Amino acid sequence: MNKQKTINKIQDMGALIALVLLVIVIGVISPEFRTVGNFLSLLRQSSINGLIAFGMTAVILTGGIDLSVGSVLALSTALCAGLIANGMPVGAAMLLALVIGTGLGLISGILVTKGRLQPFIATLVTMTVYRGLTMIYMDGKPISNLGDSFTLKVVGKGNFYHIPIPVILFILIFVLFMFILEKTTFGRRVYATGSNAQAARLAGVNIQRTKMAVYAISGAMAALSGLILLSRLGSAQPNLGDGYELDAIASVALGGTSMNGGRGRIWGTFVGVLIIAVLNNGLNILGVSSYYQDVVKGIVILIAVLSDRKR
Amino acid sequence: MQIEMRGINKSFGGNAVLKNAGFLLDHGEIHALMGENGAGKSTLMKILTGVYTKDAGQVIVDGQEVCYKNPQEAEKAGIVFIHQELNVLFDLTVEENMFLGKEIRNRFGICDKKAMRAEVKKILDRLGVKISPEQKMSELSVGQQQMIEIAKALMVDAKVIIMDEPTAALTQSETEVLFQVINSLRKKGVSIVYISHRMEEIFQLCDRITVLRDGAYIDTKRIADTDMNDVVKMMIGREIGERYPSRNVKIGEVALKVENLTCPGVFKNVSFEVHAGEVLGVSGLMGAGRTEIMQAIFGNMPHVTGKISLYGKEIQNHSPEQAMRNGLGFITEDRKTEGLMLEESIRKNISLANLGRISRHGVINKKEEQDLVKKGIEELHIKCFGPEHESNNLSGGNQQKVVFAKWIYTDPKVLILDEPTRGVDIGAKKEIYHIINDLAAKGVAVIMVSSELPEVLGMADRIMVVREGLVRGVLSKEEANQENIMILATGGNLNE
């Protein structure tokens, strides 16, 4: 038992070891990489993917997947920007964006549960439709006349004791997810749903409600991530968040969460997010062409997932 | 073909399943292999056919020692195992199923449907069954599917066919057809190993009986030289009285009352009641609808009509969640797919049905959880390293105890048990019977579905017999015996 525990622990550490190795290797090659300023900016960049990946982890733990996160991000951000441009108070518009994101996620959840669609198909549908709605709403053009509200700027650009607000959000939400998934009955139900849905159902777990909740959470996280982007860019773009689902899923996989659900840890995802961020940031600093960057990223994910399979 | 198995040993993870087991199969005989669940019948046959490798012992076929590495090799040698769970692809046709993996191809490498259909027809005619090669497997009855399995065996020219509980899901008339086929196979020199719990069938059909007990060879007898009591004694090794601990419980008022429960096409007008402190046995053949009725009571079947009341008050069980809140518990037939999260710890499994009890405002109280799980492990004698032991690595009996622990602390008023001792060894079985008795003593109304007649007879206060979705009768302890139950279960009437 203890031996098994130790082995599990070492395997759990696999992603962390990979992260440390990456940081050391890139740090040795590049002096620019190993500065405090760069690390802070790296963390700030990772918060966008990080928040989405946390929501994605919850969905994947139930045995599902959420391809719609990029489109949810785009649509909720577009609506938020539109409301601000039309004079709605910034704080209210941002809160509304979170509610909209939650609702958009919930729709995916309803398609999965009540509509009995495969999560892949259900969220493929919402991904496509939400992106289309975003294009229709924005008429394909960016919305940029957002004024210069402090509230809007602080979310993405602000600092608190030199630490960027997005990084603080990233860490707070990480702790919140850790608490929810590890300590609450809801978290237990999420794992149970992915581990053995039939057994969970027969033990009185409301599988449908649990699934709807995780998609709603995923939508909320995408929307929150979108607000950070909106704040940083100062405008909403119709193609915002395109392809973000892939980095999020990759982070979850890197973190050792089983794509079949039921197994995984949120801190694994946290490490996975950092690996992706270090790769993006480091390869950029090293001047690797973006075509090669994708190949390297793919290979790192492959190695991580292969080493995970030995369990 | 003559097969001798001698001194076979086999253990799984330190758990000895076979200890000096063996038997001798003659050319052209029907040989019954008997023993309780867990006695090692299936394991012995799986070793013969190369599914498992033996730890020790010899397998001698026609004077030559052999060791098949896999079922395909055994099949090539002419030994075919027809498993209880039929190996059937429902969406494919009869012909596609029979030729799966050995399709006849023409010289362009394309499947020659015509030739395959002709071959299938030839074999089915030989068996005397009327099934079209083009029919989908899902359109056939279980009995017909069984015939297709036998046809598959004949197609590879089997000299020995092993059948594991072939009649468990068959109706009386299907069973008769099967017996005719088996008898005609014997005349052609095919040997049959027949694994079954049904004494009557064995005495009607077989030439010799070999009994295994706790993984060891006990004896082989000719049918003419033995009788049922003798065989039971060999199987159990002691008197039946000891196996089922007695219970001295005063039976109380009606706890659960079910009226006209109907699910179209599955079961109809099911009405019965269970009293507090009572164990109601539920008997019937496989596929009679027992499990479905229980699933319906627990709110896990759609389109169910009828009335369910608990202590005189009507309740609605539209989901397991609701049924649980109403005070019901359900230990399912298949603990691996419906009872446990196999990859999770004992702790997480036990607490899953008790989350409300161990949490405040949705936050789990770690200490209360630990206490609950420790209590379960101690009270039910679950053999494990501790609360974090993964359920996968427990023996069947201990897994089942985890499932019991999960439910008994929800304090159910009614607990439904579906095959509570399936795949559980004899020692753990008795412990489970004690748990059931303790529950009854606490005033829980227990419904126990079981395919093992001795178990139902030994444990239940009354026995309800179900056949083809209808309640055929409820027998009191005095009326209940194997014969009466089988008569009702197979469609007969008691007063004839």
Image (cartoon, rainbow, N blue to C red):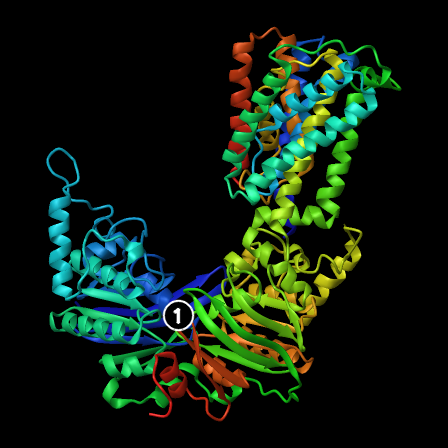
Q: Nearer the viewer, residue B81 or A177?
A: A177
Give percent across and percent down for residue B358: 76, 58
Q: Nearer the viewer, residue B398 or A123?
A: A123
Quadrant of the rendered structure where residue B48 is?
bottom left
Question: From where the camera sits, is residue B243 visible?
Answer: no
Question: From where the camera sits, is residue B235 visible?
Answer: yes
B18 up-or-down from A161: above or below: below
Q: Which residue sits furthest front?
A: A86
- According to the picture, the residue beneath numbered tag 1 turns out to be B286
Q: Nearer the viewer, residue A13 or B255?
A: B255
Helix or strand or loop: what does disc 1 sit on? loop
Which residue shows up at 36% across the image and 63% down it? B56
Quarter of the C terminus of chain B within the rendering? bottom left
Quarter of the N terminus of chain B within the rendering? bottom left
In the rendered view, does A104 fall on the left or right side of B421? right
Identified by mark 1, the residue type is Met
Give percent across and percent down for residue B349: 63, 57
Give percent across and percent down for residue B326: 67, 67
Question: In this figure, what is the number of numbered marks?
Answer: 1
A138 up-or-down from B4: above or below: above
Quadrant of the rendered structure where residue A149 is?
top right
Quadrant of the rendered structure where residue A244 is?
top right
A129 up-or-down from A138: above or below: below
Give percent across and percent down for residue A286: 63, 8
Q: Nearer the viewer, residue A16 or B399?
A: B399
Q: How busy is the neighbourhood of tag 1: few (under 14 within 10 Å), some, or many (20 plus)?
A: some
A225 up-or-down from B288: above or below: above
Identify the chain of the residue marked 1, using the numbered disc in the image. B
